[in-house]
Image (cartoon, grey):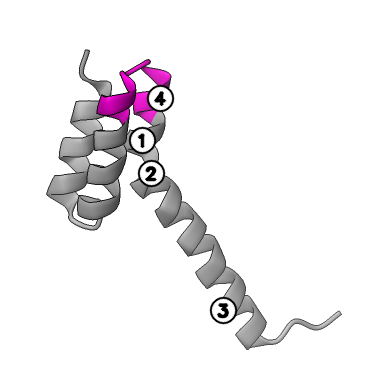
Amino acid sequence: MHIDAETVLFIKYIAATIVLGGIILAPAYLAAQTKKSKTDAMRIRIASWVFGWTGIGWLLALFWAIKK
């Protein structure tokens, strides 16, 4: 079986997208695991989606998710 370079590149892009999505959504997952209220969990999820592309915004959402 022969896999060409374009297929390998496509698979790499799919894998990178899945990993990046998992990293960006990590604060929302942690908020659910730490039993945050629905309002706080929603705010963390929205902050993660909107500001997740910046490192500082993602770190703030992560801190907010794990804060007791």
* Prevalent SS, magenta region: helix
Residue tagged 4:
32
Residue 60 lies, with reference to residue 57, above or below; the image says above
Q: Quadrant of residue 40?
A: top left
The residue sitting at the right extreme is: 1
Q: Amino acid at mark 4?
A: Ala
Position of residue 30 measured from the top left corner of the image (x, y, whole percent): 37, 27
Residue tagged 2:
25
- The mark that comes first in sequence, 1 or 3, is 3
SS at badge 3: helix
Q: CA distance from mark 2 to mark 3?
A: 24 Å
Left or right: 4 as drawn, with respect to 20? right
CB under 8 Å between discs 2 and 1:
yes
Q: Amino acid at mark 1?
A: Ala
Q: Quarter of the image containing the C terminus?
A: top left
Instruction: Tell me, for residue 9, which label it has, or none.
Output: 3
Decide: few, some or many residues near mark 2? Use Cα within 10 Å; few <14, some 14-19, many ≥20. many
Q: Amino acid at mark 3?
A: Leu
SS at badge 2: loop
CB under 8 Å between discs 4 and 1:
yes
Q: CA distance from mark 1 to mark 3?
A: 30 Å
Of residues 66 and 1, the one nearer the viewer is 66
Residue drawn at x 27%, y 27% is 39
- The mark that comes first in sequence, 4 or 2, is 2
